[in-house]
Amino acid sequence: MKTLKPVDIVAGCFLALLGLFLLYASSMIRVGVERALSPRAFPSAIGFLILVCGIGLAVKAWRFRGEDPVIHWPDHGGLKIILVSLILLASYIALMKPLGLPLSTFLYVTCSIWYLKPEKWVTAIVTGLVVGIVSYVVFIELLQLSFPMGFLFEG
Amino acid sequence: MSFSFDYLIQGFAIALTWQNLFWALMGCLIGTLVGVLPGIGPASGIAILLPMTTVLPPTSAIIMMAAIYYGAMYGGSTTAIVVNIPGEASSVPTAIDGYEMAKQGKAGPALGICAISSFVAGTLGLVGLTFFAPLLADVAVVFGPPEYFALMFMALTLIISLSGRALLKGVISMAIGLMTALIGQDPLTGAARLTFGFPKLLAGIDFISVIVGLFAISEVMINVELKITAISQKITNWMPSWADIKQCTGAMLRSTAVGFFLGLLPGVTPSVTTFVAYDLEKRVSKHPERFGKGAIEGVAAPEGANNATSSAGFVPLFSFGIPTAPSMAVLLGGLMMYGLQPGPMLFRENPEFVWAVIASMYIGNVMLIILNLPLVGMWARICVIPFYILGPLIVFCAVLGTYSIRFLAFDVWVMLLFGVIGYFMRKLGYPVAPMVLATVIAQMIETSLGQTLLISQGSLLILFTRPISAVFMGLAFLSIARGIWLQVRLKPPEVALEEDD
């Protein structure tokens, strides 16, 4: 789907389904004591709005006749970079608790720079070390925020 | 409570304490850096740092956050002029003539006039804020729940109608934002809403996670696709000549008026006013043919409008508690985090706080011109930090900022999810601003609607029978009608303008 029209049709259908699902989920909310504005009212209204907008978007795109704008998707290389960057970020979040903030930060920053610019591996390690140490000194020691320390430090 | 010099002087006394001066300076430095660095805008910059300011007293924290916002307005032009990469959408008009000047070897004077124009417009905008905000707060004292609901409804419709051709996508963006904010327990009844049986969703989704994801993470994703060119010239002569300054005086004053008065309206962000100011300057110029080829007024005008709009945005924020742009929405969230409810009562109940923040902005503007004029070469060099270093550092700050809101890894996963959503929204032409604003004000809208219905015993007619709310509702419906008219008139499929603030 390289142009906007088919994407808008698919997105519109998806949104219409989301709207329906929200309407169903809203009907499951327990009301309890009667109030001027029921806790179901707002979610239901939003569900209905999303349903209508989704149908509107799909229909508008379906009926559109004209030059269809091209979506600037990344090329194969760009897509790979984005996916790997997201995997690295997801690993960073997942490893923050077991490894702790300083170590996971060091690994994330080093791996990311290394991946984006393989020839700059020294810069990657030095930057990773500096950021990891700064995260420990500033946020854990100085500001005493409750970031995870990981098994190495909590031992 | 109308304007009083006594309050302003008291505000200066608080803002001039060493502690507050230090945090204002930090805010100015960080703000300029945020503006200079492509890939991170003021909204994400403030959102990332907001949770970390919890160690500060509220006044110092908000002084710093505000300084980041207006500091970013100073710094945003640097990348636009030096490497023709506007850091924010509002810097696009600056890039048109600024980069042309840089190619002619006049990058220094272009950056210098940016700083001077920003200072003039920023300071004049602050004078406007000083007088307008308490005046409007006086008016807002008579506001009840119907007026507040109507005002917020109008703000949302204005922001959506400014999505231009992407009206439907603007509505969808707003609806998803409202939906996100409703996840969790109903504040009045305690009923679980849209949690789908997941206990972690009971605590709700924090709007900071949403904003950081939408702005910072999606910007990083977009930026890994780009390659930034290296700076080719060394900037030595940074001061514009007196003739340049004289030539730009009219542009600075006109752009201040345009930026300030348009900036009072919800949805009219600097990315709108800078284009209006640039266009106006081109129209009034005796030599419009020079525009686009390195006209210095073409640099001064958008920069002036940019800063005047950023000052103007504080007027509705302080007086009504209504954010006009995503950055203002984040600042509103910051105020709420500290238990401060912006609106008319803020001036009555916390005058020392609000006047200290306003006074600090005058001081911050002086700090910024000192930081920006002599150090312009340094900022210009910073803007070409390679993205392979900058990207991971932005993500690190984003993770840190999001995690430190509630110290829950769940919030960081939400940030990642909204980063992906934001990426697709940008690619598919969905405006981000309605979603951000809706996420922040959803709770207030629902509460004020609930109270309105309680007053009126369930009738929505009250919104049209009380004069102030009737005016707001009328304006809201007018903006809806305008949006629909634009839809009918413009046939192409929905694509929103690239936006930030």
Image (spheres, coloured by chain):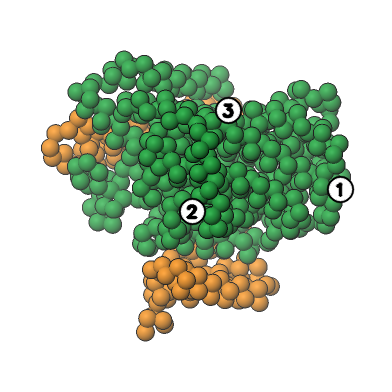
Which residue: 61% across, 47% down? Answer: B363
Residue B184, relative to residue B124: is it above or below?
Answer: below
Give the percent coordinates (x, y) of residue B232: 82, 56
Which residue: 50% across, 70% down? Answer: A138
Q: In the rendered image, what is the letter of the chain coloured green? A: B
Q: Nearer the viewer, mark 3 or mark 2?
A: 2
Which residue: 70% across, 48% down? Answer: B369
Residue B241, relative to residue B164: is it above or below?
Answer: below
Question: Does B232 sit left or right of B306 as displayed?
Answer: right
Quadrant placement of the N terminus of chain B:
top left
Q: CA distance from mark 3 to mark 2?
A: 29 Å
Asked if labels 1 and 3 touch by Cβ distance under 8 angstroms, the answer is: no
Q: Number of callouts in the render?
A: 3
Q: Is residue B426 visible?
A: no
Quadrant placement of the C terminus of chain B:
top right
Pointer 2 residue: B60
Q: Nearer the viewer, mark 2 or mark 1?
A: 2
Pointer 1 residue: B105
Question: Does B121 sit left or right of B7 as displayed?
Answer: right
B446 and B66: which one is in front? B66
Badge 1: few (under 14), some or many (20 or more) residues near its Cα, within 10 Å?
Answer: some
What's under tag 2, amino acid-wise?
Answer: Ser
The tag earlier along the polypeptide, 3 or 2, is: 2
